[in-house]
Amino acid sequence: MDSPVIRFQGAKKIYPMSGETVEALKGVDINIYSGELVAIMGPSGSGKSTLMHIAGLLDSLTEGKYWFDGEDVSFISRDQQADIRNKKIGFIFQSFNLLARCTAQENVELPMLYQRPAPSNLHQKSMEALRMVGMENRSSHLPSQLSGGQQQRVAIARALINDPTLIMADEPTGNLDTKTGKEIMNTLAALHKNGITVIIVTHDHEVGQATQRRIFLRDGLIEKDEKQAQVSGLIVS
Ligand SMILES: Nc1ncnc2c1ncn2[C@@H]1O[C@H](COP(=O)(O)OP(=O)(O)OP(=O)(O)O)[C@@H](O)[C@H]1O
Ligand SMILES: [Mg+2]
């Protein structure tokens, strides 16, 4: 079998809080393999976002080990984290996080700018990413001129721009109505069909139903890790 894209062993995260500490992850073991579509679920405060931030190299473990794409990243520096993140991970957040003064296309291009690409290559790649999410005809719109679902599509295109190994989404449908949320899930499912590994943090059981694997957290521990052969269709009515 391939080595996992994400491998946690005894992962703990302890936040210091004015004299006290909060143990947000209490020792979790997880392997996520290339090509999986995984939902991370569980009640508020169970550690979902903490796990996603650490898996996405936005934060580090307090104890335990983490391997990303076969590399031990448990104790790497912030610069090394940023380097891997920029090259290999695309993020999608509940609140879209688009820059208000930049067009859809400029927002999509942002993560690529660090690599100083040739402008023609930049424009070609960003249009390609916008096309993948069905937004090529809105490339010069500002975020304020787009619906919530369209803004989230632009954010997905931005996550795709560096050809990531992994896409991580934290409550990607949390600010959207049910129908738009389903459309966004369909977009993520389509990316997964194209071979991208996708991890979605969600409260929404319907979103969970659409993934092949669901990992349930409770109080910083894994409560259940289920695989389902039959994935419910996400046909938008
Ligand atoms: N930066 C921080 N400093 C201190 N404590 C934190 C910090 N971030 C999270 N926590 C605590 O860690 C625990 C897990 O938080 P986390 O944000 O991972 O939960 P979550 O499962 O994402 O919840 P939600 O569904 O509400 O988003 C909570 O008890 C929270 O209060
Ligand atoms: Mg959260």
Image (spheres, rainbow, N blue to C red):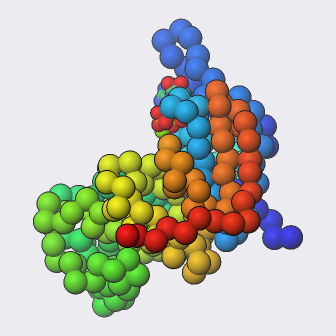
- At x 32% / y 49%, what residue is drawn? 175
Q: Is residue 231 left or right of residue 188?
A: right
- At x 71% / y 29%, what residue is drawn? 26
137, 103: nearer the viewer = 137
Q: Position of residue 139 (x, y in %)?
A: 22, 78
Q: Is residue 233 left or right of residue 126?
A: right
Give the farthest residue toward the top: 19
> Which part of the image, by quadrant, shows the N terminus?
bottom right
190, 26: nearer the viewer = 190
- At x 46% / y 71%, what residue is drawn? 235
Q: Quadrant of residue 34?
A: bottom right
Relative to 123, does residue 50 appear above or below in the rendering? above
> Which part of the image, by quadrant, shows the C terminus?
bottom left
> Could one spot residue 62 in this view of the protein?
no
Q: Position of residue 58 (x, y in %)?
A: 51, 47
- At x 27% / y 67%, what residue is drawn? 150
Q: Position of residue 202 (x, y in %)?
A: 51, 47
Relative to 181, does residue 74 appear above or below in the rendering? above
Q: Position of residue 226 (x, y in %)?
A: 74, 51
Relative to 22, does residue 57 appear above or below in the rendering? below
8, 45: nearer the viewer = 45
Give the farthest residue toward the right: 1
Give the farthest residue toward the front: 237
